[in-house]
Amino acid sequence: MLQLERLLLLAALAISAVSADTQAIKNQVAYSGGLHDPFDPGFLESTRPAEYIIREMRGSLIPEGCKTRFQELKINPRDTEVYSVTYTDGCPKPWIFCRQNTAQLSITTMASLFGRLPLHMRGLVRHPIATRDPSCSAYSYTGIGDIVFRGECTTPSVWIHETGHQMDSMLNPANYHSGTSQWNDALNQDSCVPDNYANVNKIEDFAQVTVTALYRSIRGYIPRSDHPGCFDHQLGQVLQIYQAGYFAGSNECRGQVPPSPMVSKDGKSATARIVAPSPSEGMVVGPCKFE
Ligand SMILES: [Zn+2]
């Protein structure tokens, strides 16, 4: 209970640190119904999952990061599964995925949704993790690269959003791009943010703009909004800074966040992170909840 409370507190702090002095960023949004309906069909149509090979890693070992994430959520690591997923489009090393064995997301669904992300965005993620929950919400551990999906998070935009948080921080929450004066300038020049969820705070705004920017990069346009052009400076800035390095389709592996070391599923987590998060590792963004 304490651990979960601590997690929730961290999540609350992560949000309040950014949004303490504002109710909403803008009083106008581009897509009043959220990004799912306008963007996900196009993502599904215009992307194909990179080819992958899934191997279950049976036995008593689990990556330390997955174990800690599960323990924070009061899930017994014994009730979880570990998989190596090797994509054949660039990086020879696998990503190590973890899932609660009752999670709604199957390993195939996880591998396939993650595989729709551009290779270099995938490189920003350490462990994709799924758990069972009545509705979809998600967390990004922006100091270490883990992304956690609770419930049936089956839409590309949710996976892009969480990976967008990793792109914002680049493993260093002290340097969020969404916290820079450059991002603030873009916001000041725009009359809206993408949707109501982007209005929660600048961190969520950056992640939602990332969804629209990747779409723009893939399809060459974005779906018509209620107020065309109203977040063009945010969109343009994300494209300018990240398109070539993270959205574009080069198949050269430039590395990926290495998986955490394997530890026993039994016993307490070896890490003291839950008790005393270090400044860089304790940052949790979420719960991100989507319509
Ligand atoms: Zn988020």
Image (cartoon, rainbow, N blue to C red):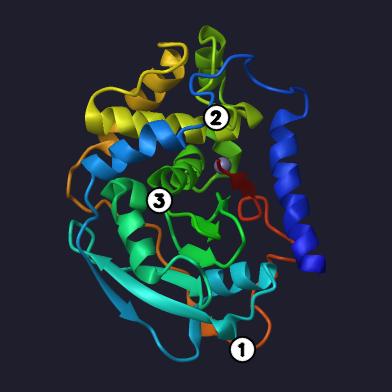
Disc 3/disc 2 C-alpha distance (Å): 19 Å
Find out if the beta carbon at label 2 lies less than 8 Å from the nearest ligand 1 atom: no
Q: Mark 3 sits on what residue?
A: 124
Q: Quadrant of residue 21?
A: top right
Residue at 49 percent of width and 47 percent of height? 162
Q: Quadrant of residue 50?
A: bottom left
In the foreground, 221 or 164: 221
Q: Mark 2 sits on what residue?
A: 205
Q: Mark 1 sits on what residue?
A: 266
Percent position (x, y) of residue 278? 68, 56
Rendered image: mark on residue 100 = none
Left or right: where does residue 150 sit relative to residue 166? right
Disc 1/disc 2 C-alpha distance (Å): 39 Å
> From where the camera sits, is residue 93 visible?
no
Q: Are marks 3 and 2 in contact (CB under 8 Å)?
A: no
Residue at 41 percent of width and 44 percent of height? 160
Badge 1 amino acid: Asp
